[in-house]
Amino acid sequence: MEINGYTRICGVMGNPVEHTMSPAIHNTLAEATGENLVYVPFHVPTGHVKEAVEGAFALNVLGCNVTIPYKSEVIPYLKEIDGLAEKIGAVNTLVRLEDGFKGYNTDMPGLYRAMCEDGVELAGEEVIILGAGGVARAVAMLLAEKKTKHIIVMNRTPQKAEQIAAEVNRLTGTDLVEAMALADYTKLSEDRNYLCIQATNVGMFPKTEEAVMEEESFYRRIHTGYDLIYNPIETRFMKLVKQSGGRAFNGLKMLLWQGVIAYELWTGKEIGKEQADLAYVSMKKAMGIVE
């Protein structure tokens, strides 16, 4: 594309940010939709989030993604925040307004669109979430809003899981979520009843031979496993799910769709499947994935 005086800038704020795959997504989408837009990484040093947000607005930046470790830290410097992002307590997308930025969370809608594309239903499901960090909390919020039947947050130490369960139940006005220690998994139904979402960083490159749960009898209870990790492409968690007869997916399509939704918010353009597929191919190429 030609960069000229009308070119708009979008980017991603983070620290570190050099490993990001987002430019491959957004620059491909810009070319596919004929948008005069470029997307670049912004490395924001610790303690400079306020200046980064204000500077981006002053420089007429159209929009930004926000990644680790600033998804919560950025919130006080926004003019508005979307309801879902406020409930989750994390923002990953800034959309330009007249007097500042509005914060959105496209991670969870991205996960939902990825699951829909993979044929994974949520309504009426019994779901296990492995982990009790911020990602697990966000996933629990999504699941509660999508009418799942029951949500079990499992963690080695149940106290954090109990906090998430209590908070999500309070925010959603339900009693869908309960906490359970990993060691108590034998209390789960022995039928293959559960969708399991792996929401920890265990198994991420370079420690690819690790999984939060190793017990084969746990995996016999899982009909579908969804690992939010995308590097490696097949985690140990996914292998264990498959070995026990279940379906398994990684977080690569979640990464794609969170980016697509952000692009739609910035440009007002609806991205079709063909355009999303082009971005998916570009993202995999940037990651060195050869099929």
Image (spheres, rainbow, N blue to C red):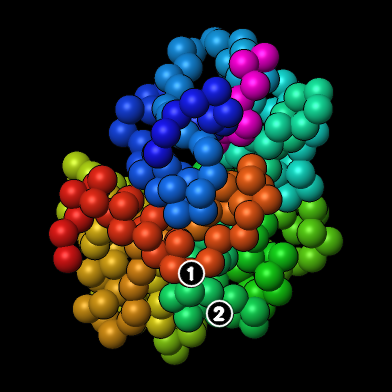
Q: Position of residue 208 (x, y in %)?
A: 20, 50
Image position of 128 with respect to 281: above or below: below
Three-letter amino acid code of the residue under disc 1: Lys
The answer to which of 254 and 21 lies nearer the viewer is 21
The numbered disc on residue 147 is none
Which residue is at a point 63% across and 54% down the rendered structure image? Answer: 269
For the residues labelled 2 and 1, the Cα–Cα distance comes to 19 Å
Q: Which residue lies furthest to the bottom in this view?
A: 191
Which residue is at a point 63% across and 65% down the rendered structure image? Answer: 143
Three-letter amino acid code of the residue under disc 2: Glu
The answer to which of 33 and 26 lies nearer the viewer is 33
- Most frequent secondary structure within the magenta stretch: loop
Q: Where is residue 74 in the image (x, y as percent from the top left)?
A: 64, 25
Give the SS element for disc 1: helix
Give the SS element for disc 2: loop
Q: Where is residue 108 in the image (x, y as percent from the top left)?
A: 58, 55
Image position of 54 with respect to 32: above or below: above
**Which residue bears the numbered disc 2?**
121
The answer to which of 64 and 76 lies nearer the viewer is 64
Which marked residue is nearer to the observer: mark 2 or mark 1?
Answer: 1
Q: Is residue 227 visible?
A: no
Q: Position of residue 187 (x, y in %)?
A: 49, 75
Q: Quick one: label 2, few (<14), some, or many (20+) residues within 10 Å? A: some
Which residue is at a point 27% across and 54% down the rendered structure image? Answer: 284
Q: Is residue 239 visible?
A: yes
Find out whether residue 64 is within the magenta segment.
Answer: yes
**Which residue bears the numbered disc 1?**
273
Part of the protein shown in magenta: 58-70
